Amino acid sequence: MAKKAEKAIELAADEGGMMDVGDAERTGIYEIGYHLLSSLSDAEVTAAVKELTALLKDKGATFIGEKAPERIDLAYTIEKKIDGRLTGFNQAYFGWVAFEINSSELVSIKTYLDTTTHFLRYLLISTTKAEVTASMEGMKVRVATAQASTAAIAAPKRADEEGGEVSTVALDAALKDMETEDTKKPE
């Protein structure tokens, strides 16, 4: 399983993905956004978070921020195989943690996340302290400071998005055209 996790991290880095493993001695800032199964009790959710943070501490992580899991409605049903059966979830406990760690530890962290049954889904990404602090704005987190917006939000607009405001007349006409297209019956 460790080889599979290591290969997934290498592929993500090679394909310009979110992960950046670099050399074995490099430290980096990472964050994990995760969904825990909605079928867990409050005590099990607390235990799952303690288990994850204990693993990160054991690997030498320095915590930058953390958001305690809270139950949320999911935008769509996510299925997971549990005890040999495919089970659908419409809710989950969403939590988040940001930390600094040696990049050589990422494989074991990913292996843990892949093999631990109480995680419905997770995302492990490379980030920066500025992005983490910007993410913490407005969130209930354990460490709260704010600096700058993420690079994705601050990215320049595409050329076709530039040009100022659209008049209400043009907007109404475009909406009417879309409405007409939606009501046409297929032939």
Image: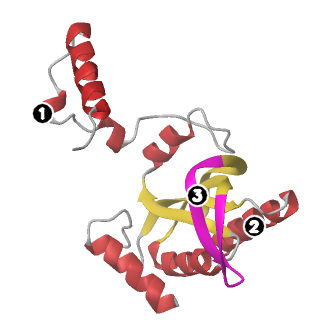
| Magenta region includes residue 144 | no
Q: Is residue 165 visible?
A: no
The answer to whether residue 167 is left or right of residue 65 is: left
Give the crowd class for mark 1: few <14, some 14-19, many >=20 residues within 10 Å.
few
Q: Earlier in the sequence, mark 3 or mark 1?
A: 3
| Magenta region includes residue 88 | yes
The mark closer to the camera, 3 or 1, is 3
- Magenta span: 73-89
Residue visible at 62% across and 81% down in the picture: 115
- Residue situated in front as seen by the camera: 50 or 157: 157
Residue that badge 1 annotates: 159
Residue that badge 2 annotates: 48
- The three-letter code of the residue at mark 2 reads Ala
Q: Quadrant of the C terminus?
A: top left
| SS at mark 3 in the image | strand
| SS at mark 1 in the image | helix
| Distance Cα–Cα, label 2 vs label 3 | 22 Å
Give the crowd class for mark 2: few <14, some 14-19, many >=20 residues within 10 Å.
some
Residue visible at 26% across and 70% down in the picture: 15
Residue that badge 3 annotates: 77
The mark closer to the camera, 2 or 3, is 3
Give the crowd class for mark 3: few <14, some 14-19, many >=20 residues within 10 Å.
few
Q: Main SS type for the magenta part?
A: strand
